[in-house]
Image (spheres, helix red, strand yellow):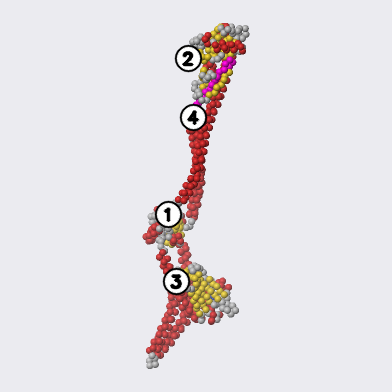
Amino acid sequence: MSADRAFANRRRLRRAPLWAVLLLLLGIAQTLLVVLTLNYEAARAQDQAEAVATEAASALRRELFGTVQSLQSLLWGDPSASQWRFDAAEMLRARRDLLHLERRDDAMALVEAVATPYGESPFRWLPRAQMLVEAEAACGNARRTASPQFSRSYFVPQAAGLGEEVIDVCVPLSGGAAGFMVATLSLGTSLERALAAIAPARRHEISLVEGDGTRLVREGAVRGAGVYRADRVVDLPGVTLQLRADSVEGHPRLIPNLTLALVLGLSLALTAVVLLLARDVRRRARAEAALAEALAFRKAMEDSLSTGLRARDLDGRITYVNPAFCAMVGFDAGELMRARTPPYWPPEQVDEYARRQALRLAGERAPADAREGFETVFMRKDGERFPVMIYEAPLVDGGGRHTGWMSAVLDMSAQRRVEELSRQQQERLQAAARLATVGEMASLLSHELNQPLSAIASYATGSLNLLERPDAATPGEVRQALARIAEQAERAGRVIKSVHDFVRRREQAHESIRADQLLDAVLPLVRLQARKSGTRVEVDMAQPVPRVRCDRTMIEQVLLNLTRNGIQAMEADTPLAERMLTLRVQPAGERRRVRFAVIDAGPGIGDEVARKLFTPFFTTRREGMGLGLSLCRTVVEQHGGALEVDSRRAADGRPGRTEFAFTLPADAPRAAVVREAAAGVGGRAD
Ligand code: ADP
C-alpha cells in the first residue's frame, strides 16, 4: 500500500515541471494575445482616423471649389451694378457660408458691398478697412494669375466676445471692367457643409488647424481624444489649409481586453469540459448497456438452472432465491424472504437447524463439509419431507467484506429413490446367493460334522464300556474319553457357529477393520472346504497389517466365493501336490487402497468362459448357480474398486494359474483416526 503511494508521489513529482512549463506557456500565450489585441485595436483606430481625414479633406476641397464656381457665376455676362447687387443678395440668402460680398476696383477701392442677411455683417465690430490685408494679398495673386485666389484665413470678432474664422476669395473681373469681387467665407460653415455631404463622422472630431496646431475651426458634436490623429493638407489656390481628424477613442484599455481574454479562455475551457462530459456520458451509456446485458444473461442463467440457489445475509435472512429453489420447496420468493424462520424447515427440526445455523453464522469461513456438500432434509409447502444436498460458499462484496452465504441446493429425492430400489435388489440378490452358499455349506457341514459326531459316538461307546467294567477301568481313562467327547462337540459347535454367523450377519455399515481379521473370519470355512479336496491354503499378509474400511459381511462373502471357486477349479485336474490356494493382501495405490488376491493353480479360464464370467447365472458347474462372481463384482464396485481377473491356461502338464483380485479403501491406523475425529469440527447450517 505504502509502496503504491510512494510510486504515485514520484510520478506526481516527475510531472510537476511539465505542468509548470504548460502553465508558463499558457501565461505567455495569454499575454501575447492581449498585447496583439491592443496593437491591433490601436492600428485599426489610426487607420480609421486616416481614412476619415482623407475623405473630409477632399470633401472640403470640393466644397470650396464649388463655392468659387458659384461666385464666378455672379460675374457671368458682366452684370450691371444693380443686377450684381441683386444676384449677390440672392446668393447670400441661399448660402449661409457666404458672409460678405463686395466689388472693388483695380486699386482695391470698395465699389459695392452686400452682407449676409443672417446675423451681423462680419465687419460690424472691426471695419473692413482694417481687415483688408489678407484680401489685398489674394487679389494681388488673382491679378497675377487672372484666376480666383484664396486669402489666408483670419479672425473676425463678433458680439459678446465671440468671433469667427473667415477666409476671403478674390475673383478677378473679366472682360472690360477691371477690378475684383471679394467674397468672405465662414470657414466653419464651409466645413459643416462639406461634411454634411459625406457620411457624418460621429466618432471623429474634424478641425482645421494652423501649422503650429492651433485649432481654427472644429466641426462635429464630439471631442477628439488626441491619441489617434491624422492631418491632411487641403490645397487651394493661394493658400493651404490643414485639416485634422481626431478620433474620440483613447488608448486601448487593458481591463476590457483582459476580460475578453478571460471570457474567451473560460468559454474554451467550458467547451472542453462539455466535450469531456459528452465523452464520459457516452462511455457511461456503453458501460450501462454492457451491464444490463450481463444482468440479463445472469438472470437467464439463474432461471434456466435446475439447481436451487439461495443467498442469506449474516443474520440468516434469505436475500435471494432463484426460480428452481422456489419450485423445489413450493414457496414463492416473497414468502421466503419475508419469513423469519425458513418455512422449508420441518417443524420438528427447527430447533436443531437454528442451532446449526447459529454455529455457522458465528464462523467466518465455510467449514470443509459445506464446500464438499452436506445432506439434510427440507420440507415442501405440502408438508412432504425430502433430502437435499447443500453446497455453501461465503458471499463477498466488491469491497472484500463478507456479507453472507450463497448455497446451491440439490433435490436428492429422485436419486434416493433409485438408490433405495437398487439396494433392495442387491439385498434380494445377496440373500439368494447366501442361501445357495448355505445350501452347499449344509452338505459340507454334514460331511464335516460326521467326523466329530462319529468320534463322539465312539468315545461315548468306549466310556460306556469302561463304566460297565469298573474293575478294569480307571477313573482317569473315563475322564480322558469324556474330555475327547467335549473337544469334538466343541469343534462341531464352532463349525456350525461359523455358518450361522455368516448367514445371520446382515449389518451394512462400513467399518474399519484389520485385513487379517477379515481373513480370520472366513478361513475356518475355507479350510473346511479345502481339506475335503486336499488343498493347502496359504496366507501372504503384508506387514504391518493394513486396515480397510468396508462392509465386513459382504467382503467376507466375496472372499468366500472367490476361495470356493478357486478350490473347486483345482478339484478336477490339478495334481494333489500342486493344489495350493493363496490369499494375498498387500498395499496398493500409494497405500490409499489395499489389494486382496485369491490365487489358485486350476486349469485357468478359457476365452469363451472369460467373456461371460460376470454374467449372472452363467455357470459351468452342474450344481452351480452362476451368481457368485456377478455378486462379487457388484460388492467390490460398491467399495469403489474393480474385480480383476488374470488367468493362464494349463499347458504341457503344467497347471494353470488364476488370480482374482480387488482393492478396498485403506483406513488410517486407530490412533490417527481418533485424532482426525477430534479435529473434525464445524457446525452445519440447513
Ligand atoms: P458358480 O460358482 O455358481 O458357477 P460363479 O459366478 O462363481 O458361479 O462362477 C461362474 C463360472 O466361472 C464358473 O462356473 C466357472 O466356470 C468359472 N470360474 C470361476 N472361478 C474360476 C476359477 N478360479 N478358475 C476357473 N474357472 C472359474
- Nearest to the eye among marks 4 and 1: give it: 4
Mark 3 to mark 2 CA distance (whole Å): 145 Å
Figure disc tally: 4
**Where residue 253 is drawn, which disc sits there?**
4
Tell me which residue sits at (40%, 55%) in the image: 314
Pointer 1 local density, CA inside 10 Å: few below 14, some 14–19, many at least 20: some
Residue 193 in the image, given as x and y percentages of width and height: 54, 18
Q: Is residue 470 above or below residue 217?
A: below
Label 2 secondary element: loop
> Is residue 246 highlighted in magenta?
yes
Residue 166 in the image, given as x and y percentages of width and height: 53, 14
Q: In terms of depth relative to the viewer, which is nearer, 247 or 574? A: 247
Label 1 secondary element: strand
Q: In terms of depth relative to the viewer, which is nearer, 335 or 261? A: 261
Label 4 secondary element: loop
| Mark 2 sits near ligand 1, with its Cβ under 8 Å away | no
Tell me which residue sits at (45%, 54%) in the image: 322
Mark 1 to mark 3 CA distance (whole Å): 44 Å
Residue 604 in the image, given as x and y percentages of width and height: 56, 76
Residue at which label 1 appears: 402
Residue at which label 2 appears: 162
Q: Quadrant of residue 364?
A: bottom left
Residue at which label 3 appears: 513
Mark 4 to mark 3 CA distance (whole Å): 108 Å
What's under tag 2, amino acid-wise?
Leu
Tell me which residue sits at (55%, 12%) in the image: 134
> Is residue 165 highlighted in magenta?
no
What's under tag 1, amino acid-wise?
His
